[in-house]
Amino acid sequence: MKEALKKFVNTGVIPLGDVDGACKSQHKTIVVVGVARGGTSMIAGVLFHMGVFMGKKACPPVFEDVHLANAIETGDIQEIRNIISEYNDRNHIWGFKRPSIIDHLDIMHHEFLNPIYIFVFKDMAAIANRNVLSMGFEFTDMLNRAHKDYGKIIDFISNQENLNGYVVSYEKAMVYKEQFVMQLKNIVGNSGGKVGLNEAVSFINREPALYLDKSRIID
């Protein structure tokens, strides 16, 4: 490709706010936001392989910290603050991923220390069909659910001031794996422990067997 055309290549990562300035801070909270079955596990897994602490109860294949998630979903603000304080004290940088956070973003935005968001967007038809294949749900119901939930995310991005982070195309991240991981390294730097860039790139997989197995309820 001609050098002059490289700047027009769409790698699917769009910066928001003063993300470069936010990334320079020593203390950062990486908040992965997306709809259920919408690619958040892939991004959380990449961060995990880069050495980012994703919560005391976060583990493969979904990397969700149910410890903090339960406090958020029950509205226990004191427990939320206790957990976040503990994580901040032990980690200069840590991450959180849970699709249900889309219903609590306005509150949690003010609880996280220097939140840097990764908003992931994925083909809605693929999301709906994943719920059909893995959960047995009805396709149009899941399509409507994805549409509604993406609307909540877009409203938050549009209306929230002082918002720093990236909007990420899941499909583009699958194509431009190395470039995507290097964008995340801009956030992680060297403060997330041993940064396993090769491991992070290798983790990105269109149809990870462990995820497909563990995230289904039907045979």
Image: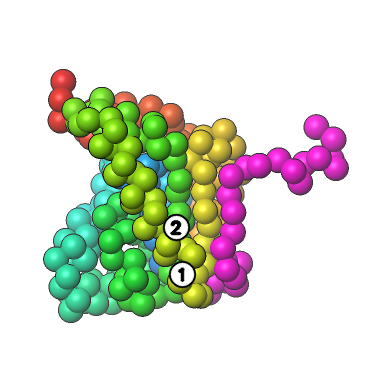
- Assess whether residue 17 is covered by the magenta stretch: yes
Is 117 located above or below residue 211 in the figure? below
Q: Which quadrant would residue 33 be assigned to in this image?
A: bottom left
Residue 180: x and y in percent read 56, 45
Is 113 located above or below residue 177 in the figure? below
Residue with the mark numbered 1: 159
Quick one: label 2 or label 1, which is nearer the N terminus? 2
- Give the amino acid type for the residue marked by disc 1 in the picture: Asn
Q: Would residue 171 be seen by someone viewing this image from the given angle?
A: yes
Residue with the mark numbered 2: 154
What residue sits 28% from the left and 65% below the top? 104
- Assess whether residue 174 is covered by the magenta stretch: no
What residue sits 30% from the left and 52% below the top? 99
Over which residues does the magenta segment extend?
Answer: 1-28
- Give the amino acid type for the residue marked by disc 2 in the picture: Ile
Specify the quadrant that holds the C terminus: top left
Residue 126: x and y in percent read 39, 31
